Image (spheres, rainbow, N blue to C red):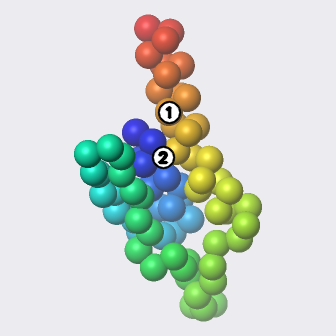
Amino acid sequence: MHELGHALAFRYFGIESEIVLYQMGGLAIPGAGMIWGRQGRKRSLTHMNQIIVSAAGPLIQLLLAAVVGVS
């Protein structure tokens, strides 16, 4: 679920991503690391967007823990 949070955040910002799972963890790998601007130019994620992508993994875990804990 942790990596799914990162992947969903990447996709929210217009970056396709893949999840690769290993025995002891995984990775959310962005496609190109760039998003297309409105004028058709490539631009990178801002620092705030990178923080959001980084926080999305732990946040989805906490959300799932809350849902499981309530039920």
Q: CA distance from mark 2 to mark 1?
A: 8 Å
Kindly tell me whether residue 37 is visible in this rendering: no
> Which residue lies at the image location 51% right of the left edge and 61% below the top edge?
10
Q: Where residue 50 sits: x, y (%)? A: 65, 62
Look at mark 1 in the image and give the residue it sits on: 61
Q: Say whether marks 2 and 1 touch (CB < 8 Å).
A: yes
Q: Quadrant of the C terminus?
A: top left
- Is 4 on the left or on the right of 53, as rendered? left
Q: Where residue 68 sits: x, y (%)? A: 44, 16
Q: Where residue 7 sits: x, y (%)? A: 44, 56
Q: Quadrant of the N terminus?
A: top left
Callout 1 secondary element: helix
User: Where 65 falls versus 61 (above or below)?
Assistant: above
Q: Amino acid at mark 1?
A: Gln
Look at mark 2 in the image and give the residue it sits on: 5
- Is 4 on the left or on the right of 13, as rendered? left
Q: Amino acid at mark 2?
A: Gly
> Which residue lies at the image location 51% right of the left edge and 37% below the top edge?
60
Kindly tell me whether residue 19 is visible in this rendering: yes
> Which residue lies at the image location 49% right of the left edge and 12% below the top edge?
69
Q: Where residue 51 sits: x, y (%)? A: 68, 56
Give the mark nearest the N terminus, 2 or 1. Answer: 2
Count the numbered circles shown. Answer: 2
Residue 12: assigned label: none
